[in-house]
Amino acid sequence: MTKPPDFDTLQAMIETRDLRKKFKSQIVLDGVNIRIEDGESVAIVGRSGGGKSVLLKHLIGLMMPDSGDVLIDGENIVGMNERQLLRVRRKFGMLFQGSALFDSMSVAENVAFGLRRHEGLTEAEIAKKVAYALEVVDLPGIQNKQPAELSGGMKKRVGLARAIVYEPQIVLYDEPTTGLDPIVSDSIDELMMAVRDRLKVTSVVVTHDMRTARRLGQHVIMLHRGKIYANGPPDEIFNSKDPIIRQFVDGIADPKENLVIQAQHPPAVSRKLE
């Protein structure tokens, strides 16, 4: 009989081990351990200030932990110098929350920005890669448009084209549906799933959008007070009876916190007209 593989010994695409980070006295990451396999799609959720964006910055080496390890495709990036980090970051594409397009550049120039900085390709090769990336995000033929001519959803798609143009192994999404209406958000969700399946990339999505988390995440990780509070398949998370998970999933405010907010910001008292 063939012995099943020991998954604990297999190399993950992304792994953090006992990751810790604090700013002055505020603990943001408190012993975070995650493991994301090659080609897996993971949604990271949690309340504002819970450490999601800080964790994302650690994965790409924009921040270094106070202690712990970050392994990308088997390499520990903690302690790497900037030249070494640049090499590892080539494995990543990132879609920023606000798309982060340069207003003074055309769509083609925005998408090709990273290629021109790092690749040493000919203009014909760059144009071919740009055209392919725009076709993947369902925006063929818009190379000459300016960002001001694009809708919010189109800007997100161009931002994603820029993220995938040099064929990364990992794509990070920072709040990809923020500021979009439900119909456009749905189309961005569909696009992210199509990119994952077509390009076989590992996807990590930081989001407050529970619909996005449920649809895109093969696993959902919930951060709470700097720790991994829950980690499992979407159905397990969204059907959980745990009160902290339910409060977040259902969007229910804590009455005690409401009292604190009211105490800090008392309502204005209206005066009767005499």
Image (cartoon, grey):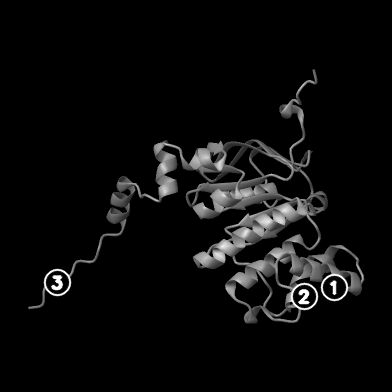
Q: Which badge, 2 or 3, comes first in the chain's sequence? A: 2
Residue drawn at x 52%, y 41% as measured from the top left: 235
- As helix, strand or loop, the secondary structure at mark 2 comes to helix
Question: Looking at the image, which residue is at 69% across and 74% down?
Answer: 102
Q: Which mark is residue 108?
A: 2
Q: Along the horizontal axis of the image, is 214 left or right of 119?
A: left
Q: Residue at x 59, y 49 (%)?
A: 54
| Whole-percent x, y for residue 2 in the image | 80, 21
Query: Which quadrant of the structure image shows residue 120?
Result: bottom right
Residue displayed at 64% across by 72% down: 154
Q: Quadrant of residue 191?
A: bottom right
Q: Pointer 1 and pointer 2: residues touching (CB < 8 Å)?
A: yes
Quadrant of the frame with the N terminus: top right
Q: Earlier in the sequence, mark 3 or mark 1?
A: 1
Circle on res. 271: 3
Q: Please tell me whether mark 3 or mark 1 is closer to you in this view.
A: 1
Q: Using the image, tell me which numbered label, if any, was put on residue 127.
A: 1
Q: Is residue 234 visible?
A: yes
How far from the left and from the top, in percent, is residue 98?
60, 66
